Amino acid sequence: MRRLLTYIRPYKIPVVAALVLLLFNAVLQTIGPLLTALAVDRYLAPSAKVTPTVLDRYLAPSPWTGLAQIAFLYLLVVIFGMFCDFGEQYIMQWVGQKAMFDLRREMMARLQRLDLSFYDHNPVGRLVTRITTDVDALNELFSSGLLMILGDLMMLSFVVIAMLELSPGMTGFLLAVMPLVVLVTMQFRRAVQKSYRRIRVAIARINSYLQEHISGIAVLQLFNREARSRAEFEQINRDHMEAYKDAIIAYGWFYPIAEFLGMLALALLLAYGGFRIRGGAIQIGVLVAFFQYGMRFFRPIQDLSEKYNIMQSAMAAAERVFKLLDTPVLIQSPAQAKPFPRSAAAVEFDHVWFAYKDEDWVLSDVSFRIQPGETIAVVGHTGAGKTTISSLLLRFYEVQRGAIRIGGIDIREFNLEDLRRNFGVVLQDPHLFTGTIAENIRLGTPGISDDQLSAAAARVNLLDFVQTLPEGFAQSVRERGAGYSTGQKQLINFARALAHNPRFLILDEATSSVDTETELRIRAALQQLVEGRTSIVIAHRLSTIQRADRIIVMHKGKLREIGTHQELLAVHGIYWKLYQLQYKDQEIGSARLTEEPVTGD
């Protein structure tokens, strides 16, 4: 709770104003019953034992006029109370939204800084729940929970003080029920506390499942897995419902019991007050005022229980939110970063070892050097560690042993932004964001003019396609590039890499998911991309890397061969086997396509 309060500290002036309004409202709530008692004892059931008040000198002796004056005062009290209530609600809703805006902004900043290894273990749906549903629970605490608890406590305090002034004996009857109310409330608290934690976990599982299965809806329908998916979701949904059932049952018995205890106290108050009136100890107006105070007395107690539930829900959400915010960022820029080399710089892997988990090494003692302007191709079987090389070079993961250097400087000594700013990357799975084609190429980078945009698109053979679109570069792009082919999305990614004019280029299986025609266009674009740049081309298709200056062959996490295309073929090693397998399959496929059809003759 102390940590949550830090998010409303910047808005302490509005919060203080809301507290003042709460104080006024609590005072106004105690005035109404006093005015009722005055009206009854002075005009409706006159008594000689009426206690003098400061209003006596202003009230008319005539019953009609006096009642009208008291009614007018009561109306003013109600109106002022309404405005105080509105002001307090408005201010706290505003503060709550501001605090949640700050919290979501902080969470988004943390999510953007966390390492890729964090996302390897945390489903997207769970993270979405943290920044949406859980933050909404905290918003409810700030806007209608925390300050309202203070308001209820203030109202209880003023009501008890007013009742003690009127009749200590009858106040004792009301307070006698309090131990039972506290006992019931404690049982209620214990019942809902675990329930709210289960509800938060269930909501996260629902969001995670929906995100995964909606994203993969095509595969789901292709393999007729709808019924199985519905059954799995039904179980997850049922867990959520069962968690809510416990809270519903607790609510179901708490409010009737609390209402019963309140009515029991008022019944005792009626009996005791009646005897006191018959004995002439108190006036009828005092008993009427006590009934009004009794309603005001038990309502805040019930509200406190409801607000406590809001607090419990918020605490369950805060545990998860702060766990995310406290997740350490393992890969950070050094405090005293070295400037990135401005002149030509070689890339060196020096006895690099890396494992995603424990000592299950993905790379084992890998060493090689890429000269400035050189194009290096990395090939090997699936799982050989090709993509890991590029991930380590960009510091998405940290090397466990050895070092990676650029210009003789360990990449861990560079500022992360400087390091990654010098690299252009085209991945196997082209990712586009919602917006326009131009926005997806620029990605918010200032200084990329329209002419540079068109030039980059032309150099990667994308401009012809863009010119066929009704809005050209302003053509809208939906989520993940829906409506565009894989080849078109990949060409946009190539244009993005070229428009940023990086010094180093990484192409990670950039042509593996496109058709042959698009591959030919991309292969032509590659010549434009790698020109004058240090490039690393990771590919399964050996046809795309034969012109590389050198080819690195990875096998089971180790660097097994390195050389030019012809040199590697000459040694008849792993590369030669890969080459033979690929081209043998292509020759067999071509032969089958050109076979003469068998006829009846």
Image (cartoon, helix red, strand yellow):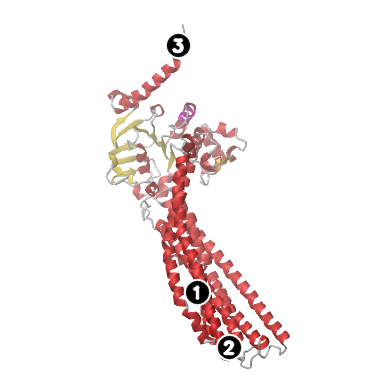
Q: Residue at x 43, y 38 (%)?
A: 427
Say whether residue 146 is visible: no
Q: Position of residue 32 (x, y in %)?
A: 61, 80
N-term mark: 3 or 2 = 2
Judged from the image, the secondary structure of the residue bearing numbered disc 1 is: helix
The answer to if 519 sits in the magenta stretch is yes
Q: Residue at x 57, y 70 (%)?
A: 88
Q: Position of residue 9 (x, y in %)?
A: 48, 68
Q: Which mark is residue 277?
A: 2
- Residue count near mark 3 (Cα–Cα under 10 Å), binned few <14, some 14–19, many ≥20: few
- Residue count near mark 2 (Cα–Cα under 10 Å), binned few <14, some 14–19, many ≥20: some
> What whole-number distance in Å separates the C-alpha atoms at marks 1 and 3?
95 Å
Q: Amino acid at mark 2?
A: Ile
The relative height of residue 565 versus residue 598 in the rendered view (above or below) is below
The relative height of residue 284 versus residue 472 in the rendered view (above or below) is below
Q: Residue furthest bottom?
A: 48
527 or 552: which is nearer to us?
A: 552
Callout 3–callout 2 Cβ contact below 8 Å: no
> What whole-number distance in Å separates the C-alpha atoms at marks 3 and 2?
117 Å
N-term mark: 1 or 3 = 1
Judged from the image, the secondary structure of the residue bearing numbered disc 2 is: helix
Say whether residue 570 is visible: yes
Judging by the rendered image, the residue that carries numbered circle 1 is 261
Chain part drawn in magenta: 518-523
* Mark closer to the observer (1, 3): 1
Q: Which mark is residue 598?
A: 3
Q: Amino acid at mark 1?
A: Leu
Q: Which mark is residue 429?
A: none
> What whole-number distance in Å separates the C-alpha atoms at marks 1 and 2?
24 Å
Image quarter (top left, top right, bottom left or bottom right) of the N terminus: bottom left
